Amino acid sequence: MVTQLKTATKDGYAAAQIGLVEFVKASKVTKPQAGHFAKTGVAPVRLEKEVAIEAAKPGASEDAATDGVKAGDRVLVDIFSGEKYVDVQGTSKGRGFAGVVRRHNFGGGPKSHGHMFQVQGSIGASSFPSRVFPGQRMPGHMGVDKVTVRNLRIRGIDLDENLIMVEGAVPGPRDGYVLITKAKAPPRERRGFAGAGTVDPLKASKKAMGKKK
């Protein structure tokens, strides 16, 4: 749902603030948030994210992008009806404190008896420059980073249930929140690719469930 609009005249750029519509207790909403929602007359939402709005026509003014969009409008999966690829942004899984073998894919040391396989080893230079360079890959906290996976193929869209099925590695843990946007640089289709002629997995799964009943 759209909770706020940013216009080029007032804010210097055109964008929309969207929120995840889920039940939120009144005690979980702070006074600044309550005032923010009351200003636009929308119900409290769980998560908020600001996204850019596509220009209505090439060469049109930035204010034209927000024409017809108002606070309280619903954002549904029908906006991806004519798309083949999407970009998915989420927070990666937390892995805790990890060594260089797991965190940076180092090869490690000898695995024979008497050796410590996953120890990084010496990192300091010799007499010159006698220091460790900034950005040295070392053990540390791994995960819980903002990750964007681009060009995931859309395999099915369910307008009735407001669901979208994509093929690929969606970032984040199970039951996590992700932001799905239209692909910024979709790949060019190969000649002879089956494309839409392939079996729609969403329709196939619904058909199979119908037969089981």
Image (spheres, rainbow, N blue to C red):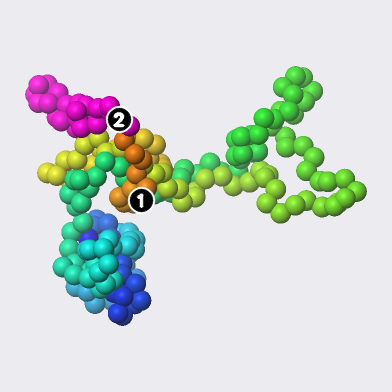
Q: Is disc 2 surrounded by few (<14), some (14 to 19) or many (20+) residues within 10 Å?
A: few
Q: How far is the residue under mark 2 from the one under mark 1?
A: 21 Å
Q: Main secondary structure of the magenta part?
A: helix
- Give the residue at x 39% y 36%: 169
On screen, residue 84 above or below 30:
above
**Going 34% across and 77% down the picture, which residue do you hit?**
11
Counting from the top left corner in percent of width and height, residue 119 is at: 72, 34
Residue 177 appears in the picture as rendered? no
Q: Is residue 8 magenta?
A: no
Placement of 31 over or under 23, stated as above or below: below
Name the quarter where the N terminus is drawn.
bottom left
Q: Which residue is mark 1?
A: 184
- In percent of width and height, residue 134 lies at 71, 54
Which numbered disc, 2 or 1, marks the residue that appears first in the sequence?
1
Estimate the x, y position of residue 173 in percent, counting from the top left: 40, 41
x, y (%) of residue 68? 16, 68
Q: Amino acid at mark 2?
A: Arg
Residue 47 at least partly seen: yes
Query: Which label number is shown at residue 36?
Result: none
The magenta stretch spans which residues? 190-213
Q: Give amino acid for label 1.
A: Lys
Q: What residue would you read off at disc 2?
A: 191
Identify the element where label 1 is drawn. Answer: loop
